[in-house]
Amino acid sequence: DSLQDEVKNEINVMNQLNHVNLIQLYDAFESKNDIVLVMEYVEGGELFDRIIDENCNLTELDTIMFIKQICEGIQYMHQMYILHLDLKPENILCVNRAANQIKIIDFGLARRYKPREKLRVNFGTPEFLAPEVVNYEFVSFPTDMWSVGVIAYMLLSGLSPFLGDDDNETLNNILSCNWDFEDEEFQGVSEEAKDFISKLLIKEKCWRISATAALKHPWLSDHKLHCRLQ
């Protein structure tokens, strides 16, 4: 049963991971009908809710705080040779309502990276997929970094960079890497933020920056910029 396999995979992956920005698995047990996972309790809701909440004015500095933590969690996963493969705002939880601390969740699609293994992912929401996933090509660490670019774009603008009128149009937008900063929502967004996204939303995965390089990018690391944005 594929759902059961996914849960067992999730348990297996989570048992290997221990990082402040990844949700922790405390225990797992199987009853006759269920597999029960006991996880760390996080009460702040999905990051997605903050994107769509009219009353929650996300600043660029908030976005920097979120993306930095996502990159730290992903950097750790990649150092452990694990790909998440399902990064999207719904799979990032805020620790509480007040603070900007986050945890990455949902490791059901996560895989150990094996360089010559072709990975086919049965995907849900097309708008977060990297071109190589759409094309059933090899996935690797940059596949997660594409998703970081999509999440950064959404947090800064409230818009989804590749979303078309239907799934087909969305997938075509992804494959042609058809996106821009033309929308008025990007007025007032720093050049550093745009540069950061431009280094991730690249069709050829080998040209995307790694999580480690992303953390060194001025947008995430330049304190003078962060002061200017306050």
Image: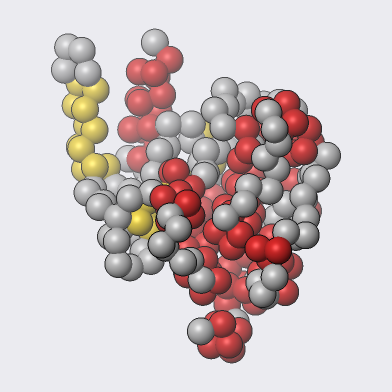
Q: Is residue 126 visible?
A: yes
**Residue lying at 77% horizontally and 60% vertically, measured from the top left:** 182
Query: What residue is at 80 percent from the left and 45 percent from the top?
Result: 178
Q: Is residue 206 visible?
A: no
For the view shown, which residue lies furthest in the left direction? 31
Q: Would residue 130 be found to the left or right of residue 108 on screen?
A: right
Name the foreground residue: 211 vs 191. 191
Residue at the front extreme?
A: 54
Q: Tell me the colour scheme of the image.
A: secondary structure
What percent of the width, then of the height, locates residue 206?
77, 49
- Vertical relation: 33 (above or below) 110: above
Q: Which one is in front, 203 or 61?
A: 61
Q: Give the total number of marks visible in the rendering.
A: 0
Which residue is drawn at the image coordinates 63% and 57% (left, top)? 153
Residue 38 placed where, x, y %?
A: 20, 38
127 sits to left or right of 30: right
Residue 138 percent coordinates (x, y) = 70, 32
Residue at image x 55%, y 38%? 85
Image quadrant in which you'd find residue 124:
top right
Quarter placement of the N terminus? top left
Give x and y (percent) for residue 74: 51, 53
Residue found farthest to the right: 176
Residue 83, placed above or below residue 166: below
